[in-house]
Image (cartoon, grey):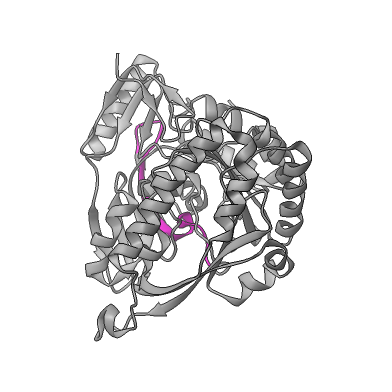
Amino acid sequence: MSKRWHNWARTESSTPVTEIFPRSADQIIAAVERARDTGHTVKPIGASHSFTAIGATDGIRLGLNRMRGLVSADPAAGRVTLWAGTHLWELPAILGPLGLALANMGDIDKQTITGATQTGTHGTGLALGGISTGVVGATLVTGTGELLTVSEDENSELLPAVALGLGALGVLVTVTIQCVPRYLLRAVEAPETLDAVLDDYVARNRAVDHFEFYWFPHTTGARTKTNTRIPIDPALGPAGSGARPLGAVSRYVDEEVVNNTMLGAVVGFERWVPAATPSVNRAIQSVSSERDYVDESHLVYVTNRRVHFREMEYSLPLEAVPSALRELRALIERRKFRVSFPIEVRAAAADELMLSTAHGRESGYVAVHRYWKDREDNYFREAEAVLAAHDGRPHWGKMHTLSARDFSERYPKFGEFLAIRDRLDPDRLFTNPYLDRVLGE
């Protein structure tokens, strides 16, 4: 029996019958054939950073940590092909020497490139899609054991499904990503009132490259983050293009002392004394200060998070975000929920990927969090009802309760995706209970 698996948030676990660590496409094909012969399912696993059981299996688990790094690059076209197990945190060392960077990132880089793209990981920026929208090609092993190439030139009709496929269509071997030239970000962080932010939320997103904000429940204030893209002159390098990075001490204090050590102590205390949560949140909000710095894009996007939490995130039509936030605020106060973690709000461009949460519409993202040891008090369930009522679509890698029937109403091309699934995995070798729920059996 293999070692029991659990995800980062400790919300899901499973025990595979065996684990295999392939080094090549041929070894993945052999694993798929073994699954067919033995009647097991087979699931690849990346960094286990999804909050759902999307990677859980009691069949054959494929660990892809031996298939990492650069396969090939076309710097002139801005494209790189990566092995499926490559982590996002490894990309700066791969892309930087090529003069490239990801077009956008979220604030966590622990995921693998396939885990991030297959679940729809995104950052913020109304002119930019999620990481999956940068997928211009892939190779995958299908449920019939075929090594299939999907690109703009081969099997192109499959690309809008394979780029964000929930791991339901096959085991990805490589992914080709469209990148952009390296760039800096000017980051401006500032405290503001929540009502002021909500009043012109849509306009703010249209006016800047990247906008997001955090709101600590039980307070009247928000912390806004506005990032502006600055091209890097190849002849001058980052320093000559105006980099003003945070000092090592400042970064350490902010990311380690405040975001991890102090946050861990605070939420641990609030778990035992929930009545103190509103006053603690107000105290934190009252000392929020401004920051203004310029650095390489990945160093601005990413924050090191070591305090474990649970998360639920919904994509809404962009214009619905302010009213949804006001309803969440009213819900928290009316039901007297004690919420120690902030609500995070971001945005993304519309795209045409079949199962993208931003399919066909500019989208705002509302993420609610709980400390992983907090007791269950229906906060997520009632917050989900508010967000779902605004035509919400849940993030595929974060907690939610919706099923295939719900998604058939929320995704215009849901039926087309299921038809592709029938074609590539007719015997459901890549399924698990989570996929049965969200896609049907």
* Residue 195, position as x, y percentages in the image: 73, 63
Residue range corresponding to the magenta coloring: 128-146
* Residue 127, position as x, y percentages in the image: 55, 69
Choose top left, top right, bottom left or bottom right for residue 45: top left
User: In this picture, is 302 found above or below 295?
Assistant: above
Is 405 on the left or on the right of 287, as rendered? Answer: right
Q: Nearer the viewer, residue 109 or 348?
A: 109
Q: Which image quarter is the C terminus in?
A: top right
* Residue 101, position as x, y percentages in the image: 34, 66
Q: Nearer the viewer, residue 424 or 239?
A: 239
**Is residue 114 visible from the viewing direction of this image?**
yes
**Residue ID at (49%, 44%):** 119
**Residue ID at (34%, 53%):** 88
Q: Which image quarter is the N terminus in?
A: top left
**Residue ID at (36%, 34%):** 44
**Is residue 32 visible from the viewing direction of this image?**
no
* Residue 297, position as x, y percentages in the image: 38, 68
User: In this picture, is 200 found above or below 402?
Assistant: below
